[in-house]
Image (cartoon, helix red, strand yellow):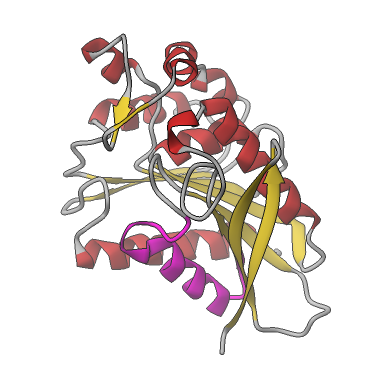
Amino acid sequence: MHELREQITLESSGQKIFGILHLPNSPPQKQFPAVLLCHGFGGNKSGKFRLFVRLSERLAKEGIASFRFDCRGAGDSEGDFADTTIQGLIDDTKVAMDWLCQHPRIDSHHISILGRSLGGMIAVLSSSSFILSSIILCAPVFDAKPWLQRSKDHFEHQGVLMGETFLQECKELDVISKLRLLNHVPLLHIQGNQDKTIEKYHSKQYELERSQAVAETKFIQLLASDHDFADVKDQEVFLEEIVKWMKKKTTKS
């Protein structure tokens, strides 16, 4: 057995959020590099096609821990999805990261964050509060401009009408300033070339903003993949590239 799994219950703004910690099955005195996994909007800690679970299993084989969790209103966590706010997602992510950084089996000097879709943007907005080894963004949202050009008076997702706070936050998003604070942090960006959900506008904006970064930035295009990385062969590349990146960026030199 390559890993140990532990169910974790945390609290964010008075509501319980649930997660799974994956630890490599090694001597108890050893500390591990780690990555925090942030799911997308309307997603959960397992990820589409269980990609987060599969990634965590592979990372554990390489001696890297991971913590995947459900934000409030998602998966097993408390809260109503309709009450989701950008600030709430950031708060939940910071709670999870704080907990991971303080875990006695985790090397707090070698922690990364991974975010998918809206979770990618949340990872960026949360990351300036922490010292990170790297950031991994999978089909990340950059801002709400493409959507706001089509609809400015409401936001509906998976049949759920989101609250006014969420709408207002989308109009006021400031990813650029947060991203620029992370110019010194290595960043991996993975995008499906067939993605119709997160238009190429988003990846182009990330490329533009990272063009002046002092740290390594790597952009990967998966030619057959859509927003969910549904192509089976590309899923393998997706997992391999992240594991390779994590081994390079979060293991001790």
- Residue 226 at x, y percent in the picture: 20, 48
The image quarter containing residue 234 is: bottom left
Name the residue at the bottom extreme.
Answer: 1
Whether residue 246 sits left or right of residue 152 in the image: it is right
Residue 47, x across and y down, in percent: 39, 57
Residue segment shown in magenta: 45-65
51 drawn magenta: yes
How many numbered discs? 0
Using the image as rendered, state which of residue 166 and residue 219 is in the foreground: 166
Near-viewer residue (43 or 97)? 43
The image quadrant of residue 46 is bottom left
Q: Residue at x 34, y 60 (%)?
A: 238
Residue at point 55% right, 50% down?
77
**Residue 183 visible to the viewer:** no
Magenta residue check for 191: no
Q: Position of residue 110 (x, y in %)?
A: 70, 56
Q: Is residue 62 above or below residue 72?
A: below
- Give the percent coordinates (x, y) of residue 43: 39, 48
Q: Is residue 95 visible?
A: yes
In the displayed structure, would residue 11 be above or below residue 5? above
Q: Quadrant of the C terminus?
A: bottom right
Image check: 55 left or right of 21? left
Q: Quadrant location of the N terminus?
A: bottom right
Quadrant of the image occupied by residue 179:
top right
Q: Nearer the viewer, residue 248 or 232?
A: 232
Residue at 56% across / 65% down in the picture?
247
Dominant secondary structure, magenta: helix
Residue at horizontal 71%, vertical 55%?
100
